Structures are given as structure tokens and as C-alpha cells.
Image (spheres, rainbow, N blue to C red):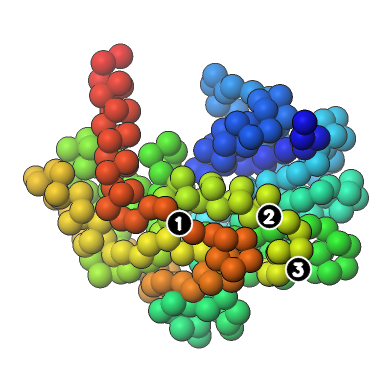
Amino acid sequence: MSKDIVLVIGANGQLGSVLTKELQKIYGIDKVIASDVYSVPNFEGIFQLLDANDSVTIEEIVKQYSVTQIYHLAAILSAKGEEQPLRTWDLNMKMMLNVFEVARRNVIDKVFFPSSIAVFGNLAPLQNTPQSVFLNPATVYGISKASGENWAQYYFTNYGLDIRSIRYPGVIGYQSMPGGGTTDYAVDIYHSAVKKQPYRCFLSAATKLPMVFMEDATRATIELMQAPKENIKTRTAYNIAAMSFNPAEIFAEIKKVYPNFEVEFQPDFRQAIADKWPKSVDDSEARNDWSWTPRYDLQSMTAVMLEKLEEKYNTIKLK
Ligand code: AKB
């Protein structure tokens, strides 16, 4: 039987809520401690209210449950982060360093820290962006993730703390809503289509970005965390690629099922953020080191998204 006890910080977020359920399936419902700054009704499993700014409470929870692994998912994302740059820097860095320090002091086996394609800027080649390249992020979120990657490497080199990380593209899932990101349109557009409402897209029709379906994103995270330690050669964060598309292409895919669906393109401040991000990334190191392979493309993801959201909205109507 596994001795692992897993703490998820940010368990109510877009990725955290889905990943927590996957971790419960693997380790057991009584071996996963979900935590967030707010609680959700009818949560199944162990839940602790936790503000990751408060390292004393993180440490109390770690000791109380004899935690062996931490997934630290709480952060302010790219678009929301630009509203209050200094607060975003303070929160993202403080929460992350609190987790790394508690993990170091308590000799935690493994820590997961999410990075993002936001670490790249316009000095990197934006087609097939390499793993190791000059990073000049344009958002505070990106700056905090690029610094976080270096801190992860520092804690590994100096203290042997096994921190692993992925540079997520935009994550698209039917289970949860994103909040405050530049790639959020690619989730919102499916909800509008299923609700039979027109969608106003905040990026231009031709803005291509890398994306990943939630099933692939959670599987990548778990596969990276379960890979043998000696396979993990990148101690900053791994590029992963699954699909790349622009708003016109996702719209065309949805229109095959909803021919009357309409989208109006009205780029706002998020356009400037997206313009400095990669259009596609080179993930050969993730493929080589821990056998990363995506399973979903735009077409197969759209089929699942529309089916699951139709179920969801029909159930709401029937209630
Ligand atoms: C965002 O848009 O900020 C995030 C990300 C790509 O990290 N989804």
C-alpha cells in the first residue's frame, strides 16, 4: 500500500478541482488533503481551509496529516495579475516560497509547482518554442512563474528538494471554469455555444495559442510526478504540447455541431499578452524524459466538451 499523503493547495481552482479527484482515485479519498482559501459545498473527501500566504497553517497541516507530497496550484493568472501587478508578485511569490520552505523543513518527498507558457516573451522563437531559451515574460504572472522555475531549480540543487514542474498551455475542461487567464476564451466559447448564446471573443480570430485538454493536463501532471527521479533532467519546468489553434479554428469546429453559433471578435488588453506568447512549443524533452504524449486534438476535445456541457446544462434545466 502507498504511504503517500498528498496535500493539494488551490484544490477548488480550474485544474485543482479535477486533479484532486484524480489523486483521490490513485491514493485513496482519505489520503488526499484538499485545501483552498474558500470551501465548496458538498466536497467529498478531506478539506482544510488554507491561505497559502500563511506558512504556519501550511506547516500545521503538513505535520497533522504527515503529508509526503504537495501540489501547489494557487496563483493569480496572467490577465487578472495585470490589474494589480505588485499584489500579484507578492502573492504568487510568497505562496510559492512558503510551500517550498515548509517542504524543505519537513523533508517532503515531492512538490509539484505549475509553470506556464507565460514565461516566454517576444525574444523567444514563438513557433515551436524550445525548452531552453531566453525568457523575457511580459506579464507579472509570467515573471513570477519564470522566477518560480529558477527557485525550484535552486531548492533542488541546494537542498535536494524534488520539485517538478510543467509549463502549461491554456487548459480546457468541462468540469471547471478558468479564472483570470488569457486562454480562458477557449473554455468560455464552449459554454456560450451550448447555452445557444452568441460569444464575444476577447482575442482576434487569428491569435494562435498552445492548448491542452484537461484529461491530458491532469495525466501529464500525474505522470511527471510518478516518473522515476533520475528521469527528471529538467529542474525548471517542462514544455508540453498537445494542440495549437486560433479562435477562428475553434469557432469553425463548434459550428460543425451548432451551425447557428455566432462569434464576434473584440480584442481587449489580453490581445497584447497573447501576442507575446508561443504559438506552439517543442516538448521533446518531456517526451524523452517521462514519455509525455497527448491524446486529444481540437476535434476530439470539442466532441467531449460539447457532449459533457450539454449533459450539464440539461441537468440544470431539469432541476
Ligand atoms: C493564463 O492564460 O494565464 C493561463 C496560462 C496559460 O498559464 N491559462
Q: Which residue is mark 2?
A: 227
User: Which amino acid type corresponds to the residue marked 1 in the rendered image?
Assistant: Pro
Q: How many marks?
A: 3
Q: Secondary structure at mark 1?
A: loop
Residue drawn at 88 percent across, 49 percent down: 107
Q: Nearer the viewer, residue 56 or 26?
A: 26
Q: How many C-alpha atoms fall within 10 Å of the one at disc 2: few (<14), some, or many (≥20)?
A: few
Residue drawn at 32 percent across, 28 percent down: 312
Q: Nearer the viewer, residue 9 or 3?
A: 3
User: Which amino acid type corresponds to the residue marked 2 in the rendered image?
Assistant: Ala
Q: Is mark 1 within 8 Å of ligand 1?
A: no
Q: Nearer the viewer, mark 3 or mark 2?
A: 2
Which of pointers 3 and 2 lies earlier in the amino acid sequence?
Answer: 3
Q: Is residue 2 left or right of residue 315?
A: right
Q: Which residue is mark 1?
A: 294
Q: Is residue 194 above or below residue 141?
A: above
Q: Nearer the viewer, residue 266 or 120?
A: 120
Which of pointers 1 and 2 lies earlier in the amino acid sequence?
Answer: 2
Q: CA distance from mark 3 to mark 1?
A: 26 Å
Q: CA distance from mark 1 to mark 2?
A: 16 Å
Q: How many C-alpha atoms fall within 10 Å of the one at disc 1: few (<14), some, or many (≥20)?
A: some
Where residue 233 sits, quadrant-wise, is bottom right
Which of pointers 3 and 1 lies earlier in the amino acid sequence?
Answer: 3
Q: CA distance from mark 3 to mark 2?
A: 17 Å
Looking at this rendering, what residue extends furthest in the top direction? 319
Judge whether residue 294 can be spotted in this image: yes
Residue drawn at 72 percent across, 38 percent down: 7
Q: Which mark is residue 153?
A: 3
User: Which amino acid type corresponds to the residue marked 3 in the rendered image?
Assistant: Gln
Q: Quadrant of the N terminus?
A: top right
Residue 273, position as x, y percentages in the image: 42, 69
